[in-house]
Amino acid sequence: MQIIRYRAADGRARVGLLTGEGAVRAFPDAGQRLSDLWALRVAELRALLGAVAARGESVEARPPWLAPIDGESEVWAAGVTYKRSEEARREESATPDIYARVYTAERPELFFKANPRRVAGPEAAIAVRADSNWDVPEPELTLVINAHGEIVGYTIGNDVSSRSIEGENPLYLPQAKVYAGSCALGPAIIPAWEIPDPYALSIELTIERNGQLCWQGHSSTADLRRRLDELVAYLFREDEFPAGVFLCTGTALVPEQPFTLQAGDLVSIAISALGRLRNRVVRGQLALKAASADLCC
């Protein structure tokens, strides 16, 4: 079972379930939003999805799906949760010691990443900043967390980052991480109860340039230093998320210097049991707007 957002025949975004038979079942309420689902407890959500899978109307919907986020949901991210990430951040930084300290510290690094309007869906464009010269994708297992702090699902995330800007000064982290087109999610949300062990998922990153493979890497969530429930607990400490929240859990796949993303690159992230998220790279906000207009039309 996969929870998806798709474009209906009338042009509106709808929420549906992709079942094991390949059929898409629509929620009975045409105005159903994903963010409304995250107000439910796990047991309530599971019962609702079961009812939709059994009795929902079968509808015509073809991929690519829309980004699986809407309403007031937020995307946050955790940093330096894998050894490779700690090494890469030390390599890029003029103040490397702070990343070693974060890796071993009790408190994890957590930061705001995106709201729905900044998130690209499957096959949509992602962007690298026009004022950066060293940019990388960051493939990450992403948690879907309800308003009660319960993990209700998993999806694939791409935390696109400017290593040149962050490396210049750690206080530039928001500029390196939060900008138009810097985040992608999808292709769907897999309910948490359908993933027996989230610490046993393989992750693959491939980057194609001019039709040729130019970078490839593999990792596993088994290498996570932090527990997922620990990250969630810190995220909800002194904060609340009434519309739910997505949490990217960090990456172990960081292309080595001097590799940098270029306009036209095709970034593909596959996580076992979650599918594959593909996005084409553009450079700068104007190119992102043009690509978004082409996709809509």
Image (cartoon, rainbow, N blue to C red):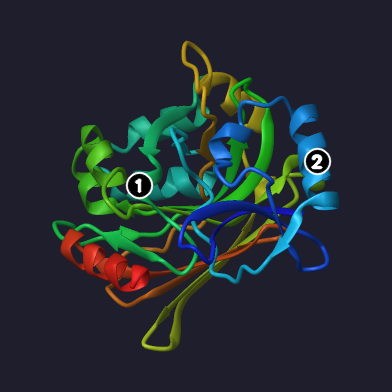
Q: Name the kind of residue labelled 2 in the image.
A: Trp
Mark 2 element type: helix
Q: Which residue is farthest bottom?
A: 211
Residue marked by disc 2: 193
Residue 44, x across and y down, in percent? 77, 28
Q: Residue at x 25, y 64 (%)?
A: 288
Locate the C terminus by quadrant: bottom left
Compute the Cα span from label 1 to label 2.
Answer: 28 Å
Residue 290, x across and y down, in percent? 23, 69
> In the figure, is residue 125 to the left or right of 129?
right
> In the figure, is residue 222 to the left or right of 137?
right
Q: Residue at x 51, y 44 (%)?
A: 250
Q: Residue at x 60, y 40 (%)?
A: 143
In primary-sequence order, the first of circles 1 and 2 is 1
Q: Name the kind of residue labelled 1 in the image.
A: Arg
Vertical arrangement, residue 75 with respect to residue 215, above or below: above
Mark 1 element type: helix
Vertical arrangement, residue 223 with respect to residue 297, above or below: above
Residue 153, x across and y down, in percent? 67, 41
Residue marked by disc 1: 117
> In the figure, is residue 5 to the left or right of 55?
left
Instruction: Find out whether the residues at labels 1 and 2 contact each other: C-beta distance under 8 Å.
Output: no
Q: Which residue is farthest right?
A: 54
